[in-house]
Amino acid sequence: MGQSWIEFWDQQQVMDDRSWEKNAELLLKGSAGFFPFQPQDRVLDIGAGPGLLGAALQGRVAAYTGLDTSPRYVAQARERLGPVPGFAFHELGEDYLDLSFLAPQQYDKIVCASVVQYYRDVGEVERLVEAVQRLAAPGAQLLIVDIPTGHGGWGDLLGLLKSAWEQRYLTRVLLFILRSMGSDYAQLRKSVGLLTLREDSFDGVVARLGIRGEWRDDVLTLNKNRRHYLIHY
């Protein structure tokens, strides 16, 4: 049996901390007008990686919980931010969409960045939105970032290069692309693929759950051709 995306992200060597930091910087800057982090906010970060978004939010929010499927990333995040009051990190279990262990905690801002493209199908996306709904404080928002909507591999690559040029980050992105071409990432993308979600996929999910959502085209990552979805609970 071949490698899975979960196994890849626990072992990957193509994305360094500076890339995580850059995406955290873009997310915070690009979302400030519609998803501002406030001092009273309790934040849930699904797919937190090594905790770089959490590091950027240190001192800016009341509490932060990071979740990831990777034991390696959870260990790195705990080493980086474990002593910070109100900050915690948890490893997701085999059913990575089961968030019931967090109850009865509630969250005001929930982020899921660069994750849903590795899900199996839109049914898993619906389970994510529903699981978050059970943990959402009144008026909470869920921001799902970096959603492939049909540009394909070449479209993603061109968007990445254009964004890197605009952000003056081209050298690092070119090095990332070179590392990726010879890595398991390229092989997995060919064999397993990424989940592509049409506009009506998310619109159907929020309609069934009785909540409200909207597509966003702000620059929130280096993947310029990806879209984002904001859900209001």
Image (spheres, grey):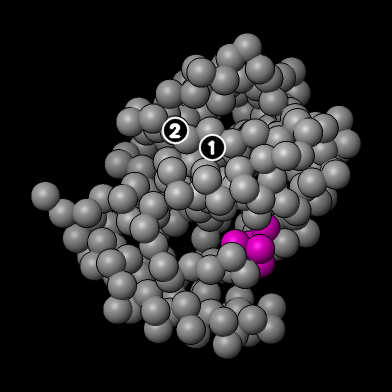
**Residue 67 got which mark?**
1
- In the rendered image, residue 112, in percent from the top left (x then y), is placed at 56, 43
Which residue in the rendered view is the most extreme toward the bottom?
A: 171
Q: Quadrant of residue 3?
A: bottom left
* The quadrant where residue 186 appears: bottom left
**Residue at figure coordinates x 82%, y 50% from the top left:** 33
Q: Is residue 196 above or below residue 173?
A: above
- Identify the main secondary structure in magenta: helix
Residue nearest the observer in this picture, 146 or 204: 146
Give the extent of the magenta segment.
20-24
Give whichever of 162, 102 is nearer the camera.
102
| Magenta stretch encompasses residue 65 | no
Say which amino acid is labelled 2. Leu
Q: Residues within 10 Å of mark 1 (few under 14, many from 20)?
A: many
- The answer to whether marks 1 and 2 mark residues whose Cβ atoms lie closer than 8 Å is yes
Residue beneath the point at 59% across and 65% down: 17
Q: Inspect the image, locate mark 1, and give the three-letter code of the amino acid beneath it.
A: Leu
Q: CA distance from mark 1 to mark 2?
A: 6 Å
Quadrant of the snapshot with the C terminus: top right
Residue 229 is left or right of residue 137, and the answer is: left
| Dot placed on the residue nearer the N-terminal end, 1 or 2 | 1
Q: Is residue 122 left or right of residue 146?
A: left
Could you tell me residue 78's position as x and y percent?
A: 61, 43
Where is residue 213 shown, x and y percent of the image? 61, 35
| Left or right of residue 70: residue 166 | right
Report helix, strand or loop for mark 2. Answer: loop
For label 2, the residue is 92
What residue appears at the point 44 percent right and 56 percent down from the top-left corner? 148
Q: Does any portion of residue 149 appear in the rendered image?
A: no
Residue 177's label in the rendered image is: none
Query: What residue is at 77 percent from the left and 47 percent from the top?
Result: 57
